[in-house]
Image (tube, helix red, strand yellow):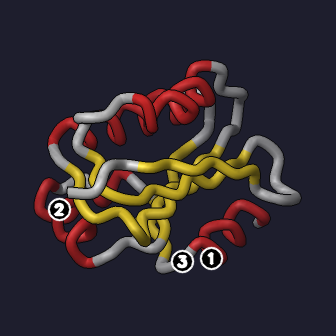
Amino acid sequence: MQKLEIVLEKVEDVENAHIAHFEGAFDGSMKEPLKELEDLLEDVQPNTNLIFDFKKLDYLNSYAIGQLVAWQNHLLKSQGQIIIAALNKNVEDILSILGISNMFKIFPDIESAVQTLKG
């Protein structure tokens, strides 16, 4: 299984918004790829929005689901949110089966997710 890589980028023209590009397997076996994301979440500003690009995310397990829910709850407390974009079928099925897909706004691609933030 491919190790997890996360690349963060700031969203142009949207205050307090970032895109996190996930690639590989999000299974909790490697904590290092999460460090930059967790640092960002630790110092979260009000109305911070994170778009999680799951186009290249192959797999997530119960650890990853727990993290997603915890991060979403953390952001909601400060009027922010996680938006999920570009789900592949495998990850979409996992979120749906677990019944948590309704916790997140989900978009078919990053562009439409960014547009919803621009209003």
Check if mark 1's residue and mark 2's residue have beta carbons within 8 Å. no
Residue wearing tag 3 = 109
Of the pair 13 and 58, the residue shown nearer to us: 58
Q: Is residue 39 above or below residue 97?
A: above
Can you tell which of label 3 and label 1 is closer to the viewer? 3
Check if mark 3's residue and mark 1's residue have beta carbons within 8 Å. yes
Residue 72: x percent and y percent?
A: 44, 38
Residue beneath the point at 65% across and 20% down: 43
Q: CA distance from mark 3 to mark 2?
A: 18 Å
Q: CA distance from mark 1 to mark 2?
A: 22 Å
Residue wearing tag 2 = 94
Of the pair 119 and 90, the residue shown nearer to us: 90
Q: Residues within 10 Å of mark 3 (few under 14, many from 20)?
A: some
What amino acid is found at the position of numbered circle 2 in the picture? Ile
- Quarter holding the N terminus? bottom left
The residue sitting at the right extreme is 13
Residue beneath the point at 19% across and 65% down: 96
Residue beneath the point at 31% across and 49% down: 3
> What is the quadrant of residue 94 in the picture?
bottom left
**Is 104 positioned to the left or the right of 52 in the image?**
left
Residue 112's disc number: 1
The residue sitting at the top extreme is 42
